[in-house]
Structure formats: structure tokens, C-alpha cells
Amino acid sequence: MSEFLTRGQSIHNRLDSNPTDGNFFNGSVPMEKNSHDPYVSGYAFIKWLRVPTWIPNPEQFKALSEKNFLAFGGLSDISMTTAGVKAGFTETEVAYATGISKQGEFTLKYQEHSGAPLTTPYNAWVSGIRDPKTGIATYPLDTGLEYHSSNHTGILLYVVTRPDASNFAGKNIEFAAIYTNVLPTKIPLSHFGFETGSHDITQLEQEFKAYMNIGSKVNTFAQEYMQSTGTYTFFNEDNFNNIDKFTI
């Protein structure tokens, strides 16, 4: 069996319930210490491993987008394609595998702020690759960089964890993907429209094209990377460590 299919054991490094055990199914929910807990969604992180160096304030952009994203969308199941072969006098088919495909598109939803600290870098990223007026790439002349995908694409790490979200030393990652060749694909403008009496707080979605990489090696990298970088800090209920930010 491939490493990809045995991913769960390698990540969590714990005893698993044995389906051949006579006690695995006994008509009720198993609750012993080696039983499987249900998967709980709603805990995920992103981390930019690379963005173009020429977008405005790239380090600020990475930090704000990583800690301000509200949703990650676009993950779709990997689908195998098949073709049918018929024989005899009936319409009955036998299916044979012909190929497989996976999608790399994804979206990031984020809270828009006054001054557009996230939207401005996205707009510069898109227009630097293809100027809306001329259709040419403007960043090579502006920056002295060669026009090449490595100079205008990003790399994004997406990690889904258990509810012990910041416990990366505890091998808590449920799923990880590294998106390479990442390109934002739109300059958002529609939220600047006007309607009298309408005063909304705005959330935006940025759409991306990318190539998705998954598997045991990606999960191992994600576990080690998130543990070593200390990307996120949480102030618990009994730990009001940032009180100095509220005092004069």
C-alpha cells in the first residue's frame, strides 16, 4: 500500500482501533482510549512559502493574509475517469480505468479593511503580470527581474488540524497541501459600488490558479514546518498577554 494511503497513521502516530477485533463494532459508539474520534472541521491555517518580491510590502501581505483569512474554498475530490467496453447483444458495459485528474483552483476569503492592505497587493500582483490596459507584463522592466513564472507566482501551504490547533508538536495535522505556481486571477472592484442607505462590512474572495501537491511527504513537511516556525500565537482566556495594546 502506498505511503499516501497510509497517511493517517504516519501523522498521528497513535494506536488505531483494529477492525478485526471482536469489540470494534458492538452496536454502540466505541469510546475506549484507542477508538477513533470523529473528524471535527473548522481548524485550518495557511502559510505563504513564497510570494513575488515586487508586490507592495510582501512581508506585511503574507502576515496579514495568513492571519486574516476567513475561508479556504475550492478543494475538490480527485476523480478517476473510466471508459466502458460492451460485448454481446446487450448494453451492459464493463468499466476500465483510463485516467485521473485533480483540480488546483482555490479561493481565499478575507475581511476587507479601509486602505485595502490586502487588496492592493493582490491588484499589483495581477496587473504586474498582465497590465489591464496594455496586456503586457510590467514587473520585469520595473524591477529588473526576468519574466519567468518563478518570479511572479507564489507557493502556499494549507494545513487542516485537529481542535488542538496550535499543538503542532502533537502531530495534530489532519490534511496538508502545498500549492505551487500560485496565481491570483482577478482584481476586485465590484465592492466599491454604491447604493444609498447601504453601509456594509465587506468580505472579499480572491481566486487562484495553482497546482496542488499532496501526500505523505507534504504532510511530513507541513508538520515540521508549522512546528519550527511558530506561525501562530494564541492568547487563551486566562492569558490576556496583549493588555499593553489596550492601555495608554
Image (spheres, rainbow, N blue to C red):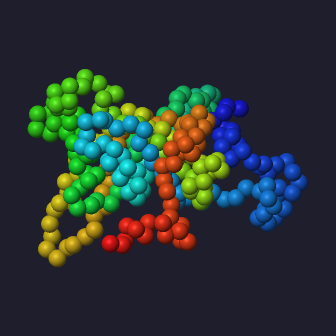
Residue 16 at what x, y percent from top left? 77, 49
Furthest-bottom residue in this view: 197
Question: Observer-nearest residue: 51 or 94?
Answer: 51
Q: Is 234 displayed left or right of 92 in the figure?
A: left
Tell me if I can see residue 216 in this picture.
Answer: yes
Q: Quadrant of the N terminus?
A: top right
**Who's the residue at 54% across and 28% down the image?**
98
Residue 119 position within the rendered picture, expressed as x and y whole percent measured from the top left: 25, 51
Location of the C terminus (image quadrant): bottom left
Q: Position of residue 143 (x, y in %)?
A: 20, 30
- Front residue of 237 and 73: 237
Residue that lies at the very extreme toward the top in this rendered image: 146
Residue depicted at x 50% and y 64%: 235
Q: Residue furthest right?
A: 22
Between 67 and 148, which is closer to the camera in this rendering?
67
Q: Is residue 7 above or below residue 164?
A: above
Q: Is residue 163 above or below residue 100?
A: below
Q: Is residue 103 visible?
A: no
Which residue lies at the image location 60% right of the left edge and 54% below the top edge?
A: 167
In this view, the residue in front, 4 or 33, is: 33
Residue 40, by quadrant, is: bottom right
| 49 displayed left or right of 16 | left
Give the residue at the far front of this rendering.
248
Q: How many numbered dots are placed on residues in this image?
A: 0
Q: Position of residue 19 (x, y in %)?
A: 81, 49
| 134 sits left or right of 247 in the view | left
